[in-house]
Image (spheres, rainbow, N blue to C red):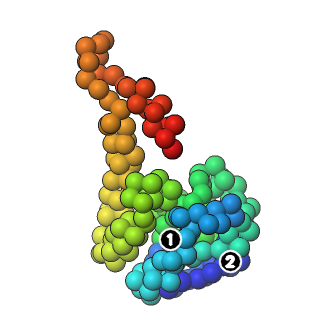
């Protein structure tokens, strides 16, 4: 199911096992990540099934600001664009007991897109995972795999050379790659 919300507080709080909430800011107009979110939104909701609600903001900036107003701690956690996956409705953020019991995973979509040049494989795997009986454990595996990819990205810059620890970082290659971007 999909839902376009004007405010985080308007997201339905009953009837769903999972909430997939896209957090995007207004500066992303024309951005390839935002285009992919737009392109896959309806299909993602269809594939997620009746137990999951895929949410995005009608006005992305107002929606994001409403999340920060609901719970200011999110402003430090969210690096737009992101996908928030939780088993509790966003309205539960005001209830400390619900927050403590919630399963929450925040996926940084920019990093995922930069690795694959598309969100399709990630979103497909996520939906398949949410439909598994052991979804919580499977989600944690996806999150860890994304973290490993992030760290493995440093591999091309490592080099074996005689030095104090036996390996070092090729800073010239790092600088060249930064200049190319």
Q: Is residue 9 visible?
A: no
Q: Is residue 140 above or below residue 17?
A: above
Residue at numbered disc 1: 36
Which residue is at the front of the view, 72 or 25? Answer: 25
Q: Residue at x 59, y 83 (%)?
A: 3
Circle on res. 136: none
The quarter holding residue 65 reads bottom right
Residue at numbered disc 2: 58
Which residue is at the front of the view, 35 or 133? Answer: 35
Neighbour tally class for label 1: few under 14, some 14-19, many 20 plus, Cα within 10 Å? some
Q: Nearer the viewer, mark 2 or mark 1?
A: 1
Which residue is at the front of the view, 2 or 69? Answer: 2
Q: Residue at x 65, y 74 (%)?
A: 57
Q: Is residue 35 visible?
A: yes
Q: Residue at x 32, y 37 (%)?
A: 155
In percent of width and height, residue 113 lies at 45, 59
Horizontal side of residue 78 vs 106, given as left or right: right
In percent of width and height, residue 90 lies at 60, 70
In percent of width and height, residue 165 lies at 29, 16
């Amino acid at each position: 199911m999909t839902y376009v919300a004007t405010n985080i507080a308007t997201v339905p709080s009953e009837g769903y096992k999972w909430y997939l909430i896209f957090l995007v800011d207004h500066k992303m107009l024309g951005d390839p990540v935002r285009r992919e979110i737009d392109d896959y939104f309806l299909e993602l909701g269809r594939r997620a099934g009746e137990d999951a609600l895929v949410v995005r903001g009608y006005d992305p900036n107002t929606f994001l600001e409403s999340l920060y107003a609901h719970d200011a701690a999110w402003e430090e956690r969210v690096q737009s664009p992101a996908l928030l996956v939780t088993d509790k409705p966003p309205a539960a953020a005001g209830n400390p007991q619900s927050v403590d019991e919630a399963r929450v995973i925040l996926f940084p979509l920019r990093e995922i897109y930069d690795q694959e040049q598309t969100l399709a494989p990630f979103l497909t795997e996520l939906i398949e995972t949410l439909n598994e009986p052991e979804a919580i454990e499977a989600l944690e595996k996806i999150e860890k795999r994304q973290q490993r990819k992030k760290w493995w990205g440093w591999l091309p810059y490592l080099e074996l050379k005689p030095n104090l620890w036996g390996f070092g970082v090729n800073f010239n290659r790092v600088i060249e790659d930064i200049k190319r971007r």
